[in-house]
């Protein structure tokens, strides 16, 4: 059992990247002759979630290279999660640069279908991670590495119902149209409230936070202005929507008064969980997600049989359990990634 709180995420991530860089060195544009080069394309690079994904990618790269594999992982993605065009361009660019495989977290479940098929036509295997894609694993892409997002929404509904005592009026602030992962969370949340908690009324579920904390803050302000005297509880389905709503609750002097469950973590969100301004955070394991996506792509390149679906886990952090080692593993990178 740990007797103190974990170090700050930025410190941990810095240590991870520094340790890995001593093994992998700097990535080059062309790579060494005979080197296997793969690309990992996240939805975005700004949120702490994606920085933790990269930490997992780099751990996998370090392990592979230390075991004798001559491999180079190229990491590149949009700054924010709404730039569909840039992500499509990145896929096409990596195809033209001659990488051997691609791991992709699609911004859109439909707009990235054709670029993935283009990669497959060019002989490049693709592993999808974090968020799903319209298509069939094993046919359009090699494997899907992700959280059980619908189950995450189920857990969010049950936690919010728990702190509300099974009754009240709640708001769902959705994330973004065509984001498969968050859509699954939202539907899991709504269906669970409807089937298990009939005394909880959803008073708003048609608003979208969009792709940044700043936009989410503005949408949250509008919702709180409209429903201030009616709302008892709120759910937000990703890091930026949760952070934006937290800021709006703070400004409206409602933090800690309106029950609030979010999804994903950052240093700011974990602090708010500890001091009672957030009542629960549904957590993925982004470090493991990046690690597994990289490893499974290399296995495909080695012509090994791989699972069509890898579940990287989901749990709920509360003010009471936030410092338990089993929970810390989900929001701070571990020196030893868990293998599936």
Image (cartoon, helix red, strand yellow):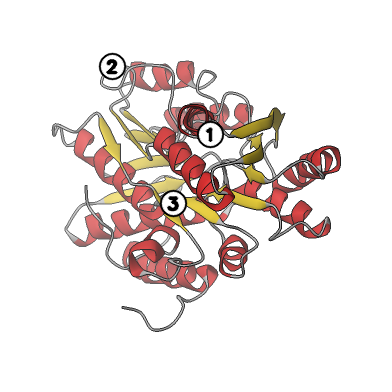
Q: Is residue 46 visible?
A: no
Q: Secondary structure at mark 3?
A: helix
Name the residue: 61% across, 32% down. 86
Label 2 element class: loop
Q: Which residue is mark 3?
A: 53
Tell me where residue 177 sits by quadrant.
top right
* Residue 143, above or below 118: below
Identify the residue at image location x=40%, y=37%. 151
Residue for badge 2: 139
Helix, strand or loop status at disc 1: helix
Pick whichever of labels 2 and 3 is earlier in the sequence.
3
Q: Position of residue 124 (x, y in %)?
A: 32, 26
Name the spot of residue 220 as percent of width and height, x first: 76, 43
Q: Position of residue 21 (x, y in %)?
A: 39, 66
69 vs 157, nearest the viewer: 157
Decide which of tag 2 and tag 1 comes sooner along the chain: 2
In the figure, 120 relative to 330: above or below? above
Task: Tell me: residue 66, above or below residue 144.
Answer: below
- Identified at 46% across, 66% down, the residue is 322
Q: Nearer the viewer, residue 199 or 309?
A: 199
Left or right of residue 339: residue 276: right
**Foreground residue among 131 and 61:** 131
């Amino acid at each position: 059992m740990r007797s103190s709180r974990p170090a700050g995420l930025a410190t941990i991530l810095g240590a991870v990247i520094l340790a890995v860089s001593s093994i992998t060195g700097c990535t080059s544009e062309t790579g060494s002759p005979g080197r296997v080069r793969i690309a990992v394309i996240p939805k975005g690079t700004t949120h702490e979630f994606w920085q933790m994904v990269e930490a997992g990618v780099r751990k996998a790269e370090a392990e592979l290279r230390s075991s004798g594999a001559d491999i180079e992982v190229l990491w590149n993605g949009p700054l924010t999660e709404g730039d569909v065009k840039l992500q499509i361009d990145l896929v096409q660019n990596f195809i033209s640069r001659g990488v051997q495989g691609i791991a992709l977290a699609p911004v859109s479940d439909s707009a990235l279908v054709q670029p993935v098929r283009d990669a497959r036509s060019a002989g490049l295997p693709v592993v999808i991670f974090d968020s799903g894609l319209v298509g069939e694993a094993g046919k359009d892409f090699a494997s899907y590495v992700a959280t059980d997002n619908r189950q995450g929404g189920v857990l969010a509904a049950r936690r919010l119902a728990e702190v509300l005592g099974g009754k009240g009026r709640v708001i769902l602030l959705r994330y973004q149209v065509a984001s498969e992962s968050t859509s699954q969370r939202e539907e899991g949340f709504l269906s669970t409230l409807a089937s298990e908690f009939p005394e909880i009324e959803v008073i708003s579920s048609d608003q979208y936070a969009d792709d940044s904390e700043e936009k989410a803050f503005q949408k949250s302000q509008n919702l709180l202005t409209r429903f201030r005297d009616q709302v008892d509880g709120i759910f937000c389905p990703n890091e930026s929507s949760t952070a934006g709503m937290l800021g709006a609750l703070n400004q409206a002097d409602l933090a800690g008064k309106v029950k609030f469950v979010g999804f994903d973590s950052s240093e700011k969100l974990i602090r708010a969980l500890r001091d009672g301004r957030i009542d629960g955070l549904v957590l993925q394991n982004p470090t493991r997600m990046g690690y597994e996506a990289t490893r499974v792509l290399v296995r495909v390149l080695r012509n090994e049989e791989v699972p069509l679906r890898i579940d990287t886990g989901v749990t709920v952090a509360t003010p009471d359990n936030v410092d338990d080692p089993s929970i810390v593993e989900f929001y701070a990178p571990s020196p030893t990634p868990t293998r599936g």
